[in-house]
Image: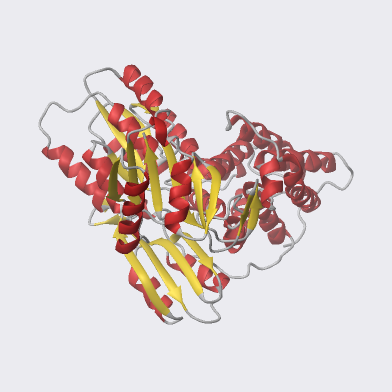
Amino acid sequence: MSKVDCYSGQDLRQMFDAATIWLKVKAGEIDSLNVFPVPDGDTGTNMVLTMRAAMEEAAHCPDDSASAVLEAMAWGALMGARGNSGVILAQILRGLAQGLQGKGSFNGNDLAAALAQSSSLAYKAVSQPVEGTILTVIREAVAAAQAKSCSDDSDLLSIMETLVDEARASVARTPSLLPVLRQAGVVDAGGQGLSVLFEGVLRHLRGEEALEMVASPRPLGLALQKQAGESFYGYCTEFLLQGHGLDLEQIRDRLGKLGESVLVVGDETVVRAHLHTMDPGAALTYATSLGVLRQVKVDNMQDQHRDFIAQMERAPQPVAEISIVAVVSGGGLSQVFADLGAAPIPGGETMNPSVQELLQAVESTPSAKVIILPNNPNILPAAARVQSLAGKKVAVVPSKTIPQGIAALLAFNPEVDLGTNIEAMENALETVRSGELTTAMRSMSWDDLKIKKGQVIAFLDGDLVVAADAMPEALLELLAKMDTENSELVTIYYGADATTAEVGQIAQFIGQRYPEHKLELVAGGQPHYNYIVSVE
């Protein structure tokens, strides 16, 4: 691309199209930058899906001015934002749109000035900003770009070079600012994603070709695609692949062309994969060409949503004054929430629903007042955005785990008003302790724990507290830390990977260790986490 002094909206589209492709290429690496060694990294995936939504909207913008294109990108990113990183990225694009408002074209100085607004709005997106995150990266990179803009050599290419150099340096410094990153031995994933996005713009300005188009043109978001005139979520497809010489990057790239929310983890002999796709057969056919498939699971993500709507249509009048939308992953858990009166929307770890998907779920309920249960801390930012977009009164009860969401639902009383329910449901979040068990994807040290790849690890209310060689051993160690002396009920939600024999063994062990407690075993069907534990 030749050096020019002025750039149009079409140039802007091309820059960020290239940047989105580059971000997709690097998404797997960004996903792997988890603080904890668990198989649910999704920062890169969330940022890619957010950018795809932005570019899809920009592609349909009839106005070629820079201002109009950025307005379209900002709106698309807002509606497609997923997870904390996606919401902040949408704010960054909104800042650019505000900074270039009314401009038909722009130069390097204009962009540097507009980025200051991006940094400001990014910080406003977070109630309690933390340094050592994507917020630090945007602030420090923008400061460097503005300083460059004041120099004699301030064309767009030189400003972007400065922006990218400082973004990379800022990312490298994040562990020195955030102790959890330093302890985990990783940099901030959101900051890395932003740095990669800026790098993609720079590559385009330099005339470097994208490695390849990593996704064929299609409407963003499986939930937004149409089938027989209705919204369709597609299929949640998971499998375990065993083979020899398996190439994770190659598998991740191929599956990325077949679907969204792609997660590929493992090594050269065993790979676990997850994706949302309209054609699960294509993904499974590809996988069988590489080795042997085990633990194949394909769920129609629309079923629970459609069943709930049908149930609401059959329900006797009058319509409930307040409806509840809950984000849930796993057929069994979806049924639990539906039985308790909530409308389950597919989502959770590695599959954060977008703002638009949450908004659609809210608007599809029959009530004028709606409560959202995110059941995951990374879904809270998107849920909060729905409050200002919905044509209904929307409240968010900040449940961060499945057990918290269930406790909140049990506290709901349809006979009292919204405010009273919100207070009761939020109080209920504090009455339950939540545990999660999964397998470590890498070796690391965390506090006093020495974790080896392949060990079972357990979390208590979000804190990593147990590492053990076997699942029953880890579960008993977790329960010992869960204040069982002051509780009466232990509930175990077993996931898609749990075997009947293991569940029976665990039930026997718990019965022997805690004979005075009531034990409930529920087939949750959740991915990634073998067991979710609730003590109350």
Q: Nearest the camera: 278 or 374?
A: 374
207 in relation to 165, above or below: below
Residue 101 visible in the shown view: no
Q: Which residue is drawn at 11% across and 39% down?
A: 314
Residue depicted at 23% across the width and 24% down the height: 414
Q: Residue 335 location in percent, x, y? A: 25, 46
325 sits left or right of 19 in the view: left
Image quarter hosting the C terminus: top left
Q: How many labels does the image show?
A: 0
Q: Do we see residue 257 in this rendering? A: yes
Identify the colour scheme used. secondary structure
| Location of residue 34 with respect to 429 vertically, above or below | below
Judge whether 491 appears above or below 164 on screen: above
Q: Quadrant of the N terminus?
A: bottom right
Q: Viewed as shown, does residue 139 lie left or right of 333?
A: right
Q: Position of residue 340 (x, y in %)?
A: 24, 37
Where residue 519 sits, quadrant-wise, is top left
Rendered position, 219 above or below 356:
below
Q: Residue at x 22, y 48 (%)?
A: 306
In the orientation shown, which residue stands out farthest toward the right? 152
Question: Residue 294: image x %, image y %?
Answer: 37, 73
| Quadrant position of residue 395 | top left
Query: In terms of depth relative to the viewer, which is nearer, 98 or 423?
Result: 423
Residue 469 locus on image (x, y percent)? 51, 60
Q: On the rendered structure, is 443 left or right of 116?
A: left
Q: 326 or 402: which is nearer to us? A: 402
